[in-house]
Amino acid sequence: MDARAGEDWSSVESAAYEVLLIEWAAATQALGSDITEAA
């Protein structure tokens, strides 16, 4: 049970981390586009 709980938590943690990475990449790309348009 404990081992499974640990694995499940790792999966949730990994999924949340991936979402944060995707959001960060999207924000960075949007910021880069704004800078390019301004220049």
Image (cartoon, helix red, strand yellow):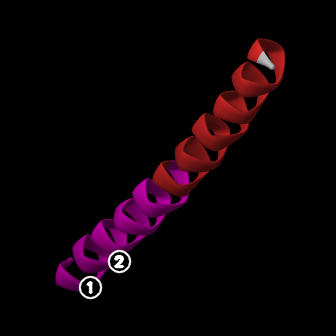
10 or 29, nearer to the observer: 10
The magenta stretch spans residue 22: yes
Q: Position of residue 12 (x, y in %)?
A: 63, 42
User: Residue at horizontal 25%, vertical 78%?
Assistant: 34
Pick out the residue farthest to the left.
Answer: 38
35 or 26, nearer to the observer: 26
**In the image, which residues are magenta?**
21-39
Label 2: how many Cα within 10 Å (few below 14, some 14–19, many 20+)? few
Q: Position of residue 10 (x, y in %)?
A: 69, 29
9 or 39, nearer to the observer: 9
Q: Amino acid at mark 2?
A: Ser
Whether tag 1 and tag 2 are in contact, CB under 8 A, the answer is: yes
Disc number placed over residue 18 in the picture, else none:
none
7 or 29, nearer to the observer: 7
- Which residue in the protein does label 2 denote? 33
Q: How many marks are shown on the rendered structure?
A: 2
User: Residue at horizontal 64%, vertical 48%?
Assistant: 15
The magenta stretch spans residue 33: yes
Report the side of 23 relative to 30 (left or right). right
User: Residue at horizontal 41%, vertical 55%?
Assistant: 24
Q: Amino acid at mark 1?
A: Glu
- Which residue in the protein does label 1 denote? 37
Q: Position of residue 19 (x, y in %)?
A: 54, 56
Q: Nearer the viewer, mark 1 or mark 2?
A: 2
What's the distance in space between the residues labelled 1 and 2, CA to CA?
6 Å
Reply above or below: 12 against 9.
below
User: Residue at horizontal 35%, vertical 65%?
Assistant: 27
Q: SS class of the residue under badge 2?
A: helix
Q: Position of residue 1 (x, y in %)?
A: 81, 20
